[in-house]
Amino acid sequence: MKIILLGAPGSGKGTVADQICAEFNIPHISTGVIFRDNIEKGTEIGKLAKQLIDNGSLMPDNITIALVKDRLLQTDCKNGYVLDGFPRTLEQAKALSKLTQIDAVIYINVPKQDILNRIENRMICTKCKKNFDKIIYKKSVCDQCGGKLEKRADDNLVAIEQRYDIYTKESQPLIKYYQKQMFEVAGSKTREETYKLVREFLKKRKC
Ligand code: ADP
Ligand code: ZN
């Protein structure tokens, strides 16, 4: 089962992706995680990513597409995957359509104000990259691996506004592009309620 998750930054794509991957046993491919790994490792891509991502800009399509193309060729992808954060532009969507056929597209729709609040409160595990909401989760270490939690460098209000604007301009056209095969879920509910709807949809599709 090959799944795309669409939604604004902070809509909960990463959380839903983790839930799907745990249940259906397929890898979670997040371009954001791949770029942040490159930043940590200080690669050439990481150096560029550091500049662009911290101020809320997108990475260039050619680099992003090449990275995803490579990743999808790895053996763990043979039974499917969840793409989180890719495609983010029409050009990326068109490139993806040449690489493979996607089975399901899920759009997590969340109002802008909820998004801004969530990103402000988002903490991320430095080890396993799991996300937490500091209003709900009060500890400073990850419940999954014990890693330290910290705020992402691009989760500041200026970068968030910039990311949201870019999302509206670059990524919202994807909602129209995938309309015919898209399942839309209101993502303002709890993570359990949101996932319940996603799960029912995926089970019904039996893919
Ligand atoms: P969020 O969903 O909160 O925006 P991500 O972890 O998905 O966070 O992405 C973080 C940043 O990485 C984005 O703001 C962007 O700069 C870069 N990025 C991630 N995916 C892509 C992509 N498909 N194309 C271009 N840039 C990307
Ligand atoms: Zn962790």
Image (tube, rainbow, N blue to C red):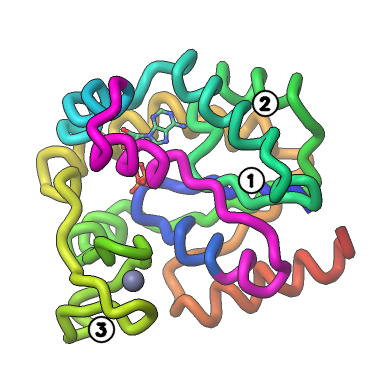
Rendered image quadrant of residue 99 = top right
Direction from residue 68 to residue 46 in the image, left or right: left
- Residue under label 3, please give it: 136
Element type where label 1 sits in the image:
strand
Rendered image quadrant of residue 26 = bottom right
Mark 3 crowdedness (10 Å alpha carbons): few <14, some 14-19, many ≥20 = few
Direction from residue 18 to residue 167 in the image, left or right: left
Q: Amino acid at mark 1?
A: Ile
Between disc 2 and disc 3, whose residue precedes?
A: 2
Between disc 1 and disc 2, whose residue precedes?
A: 1
Residue 155 spot, x, y in % from top left: 18, 50
Q: Is residue 83 above or below residue 98?
A: below
Mark 1 crowdedness (10 Å alpha carbons): few <14, some 14-19, many ≥20 = many
Q: Does residue 99 show up magenta in the picture? A: no
- Residue under label 2, please give it: 96
Q: Are marks 1 and 2 in contact (CB under 8 Å)?
A: yes
Q: CA distance from mark 2 to mark 3?
A: 36 Å
Residue 31 spot, x, y in % from top left: 45, 39
- Residue under label 1, please give it: 4
The residue lying at 57 percent from left, 22 percent from top is 92
The residue lying at 70 percent from left, 67 percent from top is 25
Q: Main secondary structure of the magenta part?
A: helix
Between disc 1 and disc 3, whose residue precedes?
A: 1
Q: Does residue 30 show up magenta in the picture? A: yes
Q: Quadrant of ligand 1?
A: top left
Element type where label 2 sits in the image:
helix
Magenta residues (range)? 19-44
Residue 130 spot, x, y in % from top left: 37, 67
Q: Amino acid at mark 3?
A: Ile
The residue lying at 28 percent from left, 79 percent from top is 146
Q: How many marks?
A: 3
